Amino acid sequence: MRILIAEDDEMLADVLTQSLRQSGYAVDAVRDGQAADTVLRSQEFDLLILDLGLPRLSGLEVLQNLRAQNSHLPVLILTAADSVDQRVKGLDLGADDYMAKPFALSELEARVRALTRRGAGGGGTLLRHGRLVFDQTGRVALVDDKPLDLSAREVSLLEILLTRAGRMVNKNQIVDHLCQWGEEVSSNAIEVYVHRLRKKLEPSGVRIATVRGLGYCLQRDVPETAEAR
């Protein structure tokens, strides 16, 4: 999952970036509204954390422009504690949630988890695929209630594939949602991540199918008796 933080307070932006990266998200940050507007027009994200008091272009203008493009990107707005009018305007313009400063990091991370689940089309914290269960809150994968030993990158890759189970996911989409700016990830590296995850998923009956030229698709083996029906 890839998050964009638009926050002009450098210290706060750095704290949020590091905290969310430790939770397994790919995170990028911009310091003004014009930069946020430009990036959002050209790149894909799974969540926008948007400060309303941005220079050059206000957070409300960034949000208005985003919704004018028919984007359904989940948006969590950050506001000063006394800016009730701005919070109302933000929600009216299409923000999904807001937090007043100062706030607890643990609460922000909980709201981030809820919004990214909603954006991925999930209503709960568990993603199920056959015998495989992925807990988006604890960011752990289980097969028959036994945890799989996955690296942070494998966890993120599995989440990307699970939220698009049954659909093709190409390498560019994986890079877009897996990596932050300045992180060089080659096509070969993606193949290595997929290969390692595929091997670890084998005991669950869940497999990652490769369609040359198109990408990857998460599938599960169906018993012959079930197919016969």
Image (cartoon, rainbow, N blue to C red):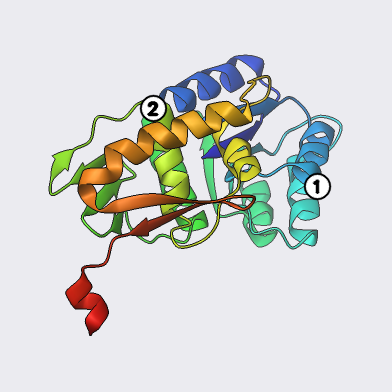
Sequence-first tag of 1 and 2: 1
170 or 19, which lies in front? 170
Q: Specify whether residue 207 is in view.
A: yes
Gap in Å between the C-alphas at discs 1 and 2?
A: 35 Å
Residue drawn 69% across and 39% down? 52
Which amino acid type is shown beneath numbered disc 1?
Glu
Verify CB contact (< 8 Å) between mark 1 and mark 2. Answer: no
Q: Specify whether residue 80 is in view.
A: no
Q: Position of residue 86 (x, y in %)?
A: 68, 47
Depicted 58 relative to depicted 27: above or below:
below
**Residue 61: which disc?**
1
Which amino acid type is shown beneath numbered disc 2?
Ala
Residue drawn 48% across and 24% down? 21
Q: Position of residue 95 (x, y in %)?
A: 62, 54
Q: Position of residue 3 (x, y in %)?
A: 58, 36
Q: Position of residue 184 (x, y in %)?
A: 65, 21
Is 186 placed left or right of 195 in the picture? right
Depicted 43 relative to depicted 70: above or below:
above
**Residue 132: which disc?**
none
Report which quarter residue 203 is drawn in: top left
**Dot 2 crowding, Cα within 10 Å, few <14, some 14–19, many 20+:** some
Is 154 placed left or right of 33 in the picture? left
The mark lying in front, picked from 1 and 2, is 2
122 or 96, which lies in front? 122
Residue drawn 23% across and 85% down? 229
Q: Secondary structure at mark 2?
A: helix
Residue drawn 39% across and 27% down? 152
Report which quarter residue 113 is drawn in: top left
Residue under circle 2? 152
